[in-house]
Amino acid sequence: MSRTPARYAAGLLLACSAAFAATPALAAWPDKPITFVAPFTAGGANDLVARIIAKAVGSALNQPVIVENRPGAGGIVGAAHVARSAADGYTYLVGSNGTVTNSLIRSDQPYKDEALTPVALLSITPSVIVANPSNPAKDLKDFVARARQSKTDRITFSTAGNGSTPHFVAEMMKEATGLPIEPIAYKSGSEGVTAVIGNQVDATSEASIVTLPLIQSGKLKALATTWDKRMASAPDIPTTSEAGFPSIRIGHWAGLFAPTGTPADVLDKMNAAVDASLQTREVQDALRQSSIEPGGGSRASFAEFAASERERLGKVVKSGHMQTQ
């Protein structure tokens, strides 16, 4: 049975209320190093955000924050590790879109969604739809118009696997444009981008931190950014909404999650440390240098955001038949 964003958000927060009541507050927290688990390999947007914010939060809390990469299965390996960790305030997941959509797509998720509790929204990284520079289209609107005019029977779109952000973009484009877009799964987003550069597929989308350097060097052509405003570092790239397709909307967001049962006062203290860090010029400059927008806000607002994304993207999962057995 599907749940509304409000019910899902309430569930995320209330699932651990009994544990909060039963667990004494950790008054001395933190008195040892904290671990942020990044569930993807080093070098991507998730890892970059984790390291920038870990450093700032460590300074704010006067304890080191160590970033540990545990990649695999679209973020599930790292998420499962955190879900099974002690709820003592010392282990957190730097989650992503997949943290709220994987259970909608995969039947083999090795932990329950309720085992993780939202703590703070860290950032949102726009995704950029790109094609090979040899493609004559000047932007997404032109790309769609040319495809319709040519009546092509297949437009290949590389993805980082089932349920990845590029996969969502491919399904959103298929639904919004009516074009015969065929997702082609690669092992990673970087391999999918390489396939576009090599003209092995027609298009893809990836985080701005990955695509912008390649766009600027002439190896990729930008068609549109998939968030709701243009990027300050690349203001000439129009949004999908400007191209006439507002339903093609997704960002590579990062958010902090804790094992359910972590004391509420500890989560509040972590949320405050993250929020304060995100408001510093040093962190904002470091993120925006890669066209990553700082997050922030309360625990409740992040839970509501995560629930809303699950509801919205869940509709794409169903229409695109993205579920696996």
Image (spheres, helix red, strand yellow):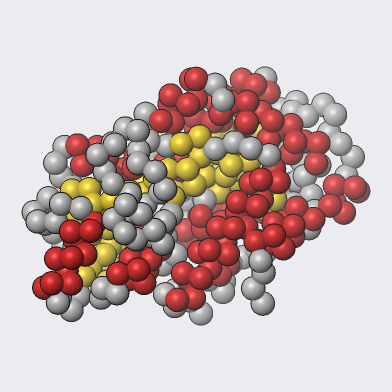
The answer to whether one can see residue 205 in this image is no
Q: Is residue 216 left or right of residue 275?
A: left
Q: Is residue 240 left or right of residue 307?
A: left
Is 138 drawn above or below residue 103 in the view shown?
above
Relative depth, front residue between 302 and 51: 302
Relative depth, front residue between 157 and 31: 157
**Residue at left offset 59%, top offset 42%:** 121
> Which quadrant of the rendered structure holds the N terminus?
bottom right
Is 203 drawn above or below residue 38 in the view shown?
below
Q: Is residue 199 left or right of residue 39?
A: left
**Residue at left offset 74%, top offset 60%:** 11
Q: How many marks?
A: 0
**Residue at left offset 25%, top offset 75%:** 180
Location of residue 107 in the rendering, given as x and y in whole percent from the top left corner: 56, 74
The answer to whether one can see residue 79 in this image is yes
User: In which image quadrant can residue 187 be found?
Assistant: bottom left
Q: Is residue 169 left or right of residue 311?
A: left
Is 116 drawn above or below residue 61 in the view shown?
below
Location of residue 173 in the rendering, given as x and y in whole percent from the top left corner: 33, 66
Relative depth, front residue between 53 and 275: 275
Location of residue 152 in the rendering, given as x and y in whole percent from the top left corner: 15, 75
**Residue at left offset 56%, top offset 29%:** 278
Location of residue 168 in the rendering, given as x and y in whole percent from the top left corner: 41, 63
